[in-house]
Image (cartoon, rainbow, N blue to C red):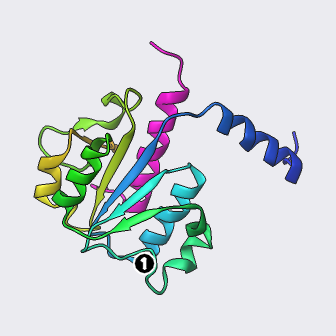
Amino acid sequence: MRQLDGTGLKRLHREWRRRTEGRIALLVDGVSSTYNVGSLLRTSAAERVEHLWFTESATPPTAPGVGKTALGTDRYLTWTIGGSGAECAAAIRAAGWYLVGLELSEGALPLHEVDLRSAPVCLAIGHEDRGLASSTVAACDAVAFVPQLGRVGSLNVAVAAAIAIYETRRQEWAPPT
């Protein structure tokens, strides 16, 4: 087995793009680290996230330092900046997205148990320490968490978002049950 060359890599990505029709968006609610925002942008571009909404309390993708981690991938993305989490959530739901908050909270379901394939999905992710604003959680159609087995109680926000984005794609690619 050998690594793919440039042409092989392009063919592989083209094949997966053809197999993928589902729509994903992100609501970035208060994420403050430029490194996390840059990582969110890079993952979003890699997994064809359609649009990102940034709350007024989040570090915007245009902030100095974001590009160090995003590595130019922001050119493949569109975003909206401004408003509270609840205001952004209202706009997201009005645009026809199913809003799923990623939060460790009472009543949250394990991410793999949430139906992420029946409608366009917008994943809401929150601040590194405080998580989603309570008003954002209240505006979500569903709230989910990433099950963790170790002694650490939480994941980095960009890592958790990447897992949720991938789980959304995985459910789409999986055969119907």
Report which residue position mark 1 lands on: 34
Q: Would residue 45 be found to the left or right of residue 83 on screen?
A: right
Residue at 25 percent across and 73 percent down: it is 56
State the quadrant of the C terminus: top left
State the quadrant of the N terminus: top right
Residue 156 is at least partly visible in this image: no
Percent x, y of residue 62: 46, 79
Nearer-the-camera pick, 147 or 176: 176
SS at circle 1: helix
The stretch in magenta equals 150-177
Nearer-the-camera pick, 48 or 40: 48
Residue 22 magenta-highlighted: no
For label 1, count other residues whose C-alpha is less than 10 Å away and answer few (under 14), some (14-19) or many (20+).
many
The answer to which image quadrant residue 125 occupies is bottom left
Which secondary structure class fits the magenta region best?
A: helix
Nearer-the-camera pick, 85 or 42: 85
Outermost residue, bottom side: 64
As drawn, 122 above or below 19: below
Percent x, y of residue 133: 16, 61
Percent x, y of residue 148: 33, 45
Residue at 50 percent across and 29 percent down: it is 172
As drawn, 18 above or below 153: above
Residue 39 is at least partly visible in this image: yes
Q: Would residue 31 be found to the left or right of residue 74 on screen?
A: left
Percent x, y of residue 14: 74, 41
User: Which amino acid type is marked by label 1?
Assistant: Thr
Q: Would residue 93 be found to the left or right of residue 80 on screen?
A: left
